[in-house]
């Protein structure tokens, strides 16, 4: 879900986590009522581990999603960007990677840029928004996937 949809974490939080937690809590209560100490402990620890791992994945879902998508589809994406004609006015070659939002609310467009001189590497390491050469608009965040990308 995380790789194929930018809304995968929302579905996970609103559907899968509650269902799994409710099922786990019911199993823990049943084990506690029937005095199955080992089963109670293992179910409790499993439920706790699930919540910790889910929380960690949710907090890091943006970076994890970008890294996984890049790992899976970078060859296709690179070929698509490099096949474009040279842009005008010194702009960098780019393509729309992903767009989220609905009906003008919380719209966010993520672009993949080819930066042959690696001019955005400092912006990626500083994590500061700004206006950068080769990009016609202000950018809230630059993430470096690999050298020149």
Image (cartoon, helix red, strand yellow):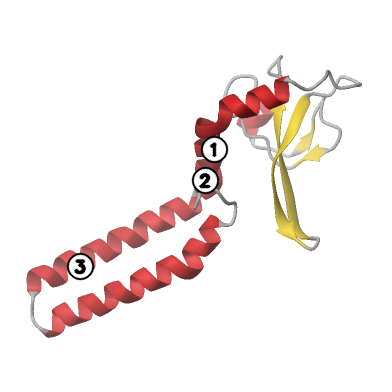
> What is the CA distance from the residue labelled 2 to the residue labelled 3?
29 Å
> What is the CA distance from the residue labelled 2 to the residue labelled 1?
6 Å
Q: Which residue is identified by label 3?
A: 43
To which quarter of the image does residue 24 belong?
bottom left
Along the line of sight, the residue nearer the viewer: 144 or 24:
24
On residue 89, the disc is none
Q: Is residue 13 above or below residue 81?
A: below
Question: For numbered disc 1, what is the local secondary structure?
Answer: helix
Q: Is residue 13 above or below residue 110?
A: below
Q: Position of residue 62 (x, y in %)?
A: 56, 46
Rendered-image quadrant of the C terminus: top right
Is 99 displayed left or right of 125 in the figure? right
Q: Which residue is identified by label 1?
A: 69
Contact, CB < 8 Å: mark 1 with mark 3? no
Is 148 displayed left or right of 60 in the figure? right
Q: Position of residue 43 (x, y in %)?
A: 20, 67
For the point 29% across and 58% down, the residue is 49
| Mark 3 crowd level (few <14, some 14–19, many ≥20, 10 Å Cα) | some
Question: For numbered disc 3, what is the local secondary structure?
Answer: helix
Contact, CB < 8 Å: mark 2 with mark 1? yes
On residue 3, the disc is 2
Of the residues tagged 1 and 3, which is closer to the observer? 1
Is 104 displayed left or right of 125 in the figure? right
Q: Is residue 9 above or below residue 123?
A: below
Quick one: which residue is furthest to the right in this view? 89
Question: For numbered disc 2, what is the local secondary structure?
Answer: loop
> What is the CA distance from the residue labelled 1 to the residue labelled 3?
33 Å
Q: Which badge, 2 or 3, comes first in the chain's sequence?
A: 2
Q: Position of residue 102 (x, y in %)?
A: 74, 61
Residue 116 in view (yes/no): yes
């Amino acid at each position: 879900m995380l790789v194929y949809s930018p809304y995968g974490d929302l579905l996970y939080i609103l559907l899968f986590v509650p269902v799994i937690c409710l099922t786990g809590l019911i199993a823990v209560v049943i084990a506690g009522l029937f005095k199955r100490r080992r089963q109670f402990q293992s179910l409790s620890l499993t439920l706790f581990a699930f919540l910790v791992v889910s929380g960690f994945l949710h907090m890091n879902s943006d970076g994890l999603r970008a890294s996984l998508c890049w790992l899976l589809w970078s060859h296709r994406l690179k070929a698509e960007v490099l096949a474009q004609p040279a842009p005008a006015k010194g702009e960098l070659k780019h393509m729309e990677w992903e767009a989220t939002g609905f009906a003008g609310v919380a719209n966010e467009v993520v672009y993949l840029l080819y930066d042959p001189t690696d001019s955005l590497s400092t912006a990626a390491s500083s994590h500061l928004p700004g206006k950068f050469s080769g990009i016609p608009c202000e950018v809230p965040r630059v993430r470096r996937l690999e050298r020149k990308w």
